[in-house]
Image: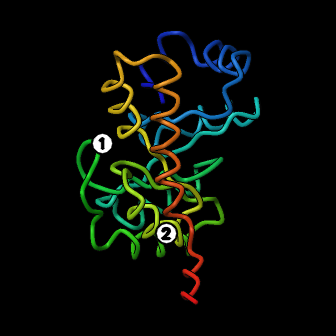
Amino acid sequence: MVSYSIIHRQGVDRYLREAVTAGIDGLIVPDLPVEESEGLCRKATALDLRLIQLVTPTTPRDRAVQITRSTTGFVYYVSVAGITGERRSIPANLVENVAWLRTQTDLPICIGFGISTPEHVRELAPVADGLIVGSALVKRLVDAEKLTRAEVVKEIGQFVAELANGLDTTPPRPAI
């Protein structure tokens, strides 16, 4: 994720070449309007880089379609209006919005912003191709500041395992 001002200041061609050299597969440029993304998308695609663009709950549907047509890699669906961070619950219309978006594109749809519990994963996994967990991991890393590397790896691993448990849709076996 990078601001377009950084790409522009360094020079688009140079930035993209250095990104490829560094092993970057895709870019999220949240401050680049879809109307101005064609040049960057074309140059990134020529270098086998993906340009992942954001669709939000407040994006008008005609604009969401335009965004999906200029996106490569996957569509990043922002789960909530506002800033990123852990949430207790997901918006009621999120599943419906993503289901509609799926009818508009063949690209994978990944949902991010606020994903932080196994319940979120359980609810969103049926409509998403991927779930993006950022703030919840960063918070745990900050909280683990005084732990050893091994302790941090263990705690983060346990958190990720908890989230992954939300993917288990196998009904429990009946007690015998």
Give the alpha-carbon distance from disc 2 to disc 1, as whole Å: 21 Å
What residue lies at 68% left-to-right and 32% top-to-bottom? 25
Is there any visible trace of residue 67 in the rendered image?
Answer: no
Total marks in image: 2
Query: Image height check: is 69 above or below 103?
Result: above
Is there any visible trace of residue 127 in the rendered image?
Answer: yes
Q: Which residue is mark 2?
A: 101
- Residue type, label 1: Thr
Quadrant placement of the C terminus: bottom right
101 vs 91, left or right, is: right
What residue lies at 55% left-to-right and 70% top-to-bottom? 102
Residue 126: x and y in percent read 53, 72
On the image, which quarter does residue 62 sit in? bottom left
What residue lies at 58% left-to-right and 56% top-to-bottom? 69
Query: Image height check: is 99 above or below 9?
Result: below
Residue 15: x and y in percent read 61, 16
Query: Image height check: is 80 above or below 119?
Result: above
Q: Upstream in the sequence, badge 2 or badge 1?
A: 1
What residue lies at 64% left-to-right and 47% top-to-bottom? 72
Residue 32: x and y in percent read 43, 35
Q: Which residue is mark 1?
A: 84
Query: Image height check: is 51 above or below 22?
Result: below
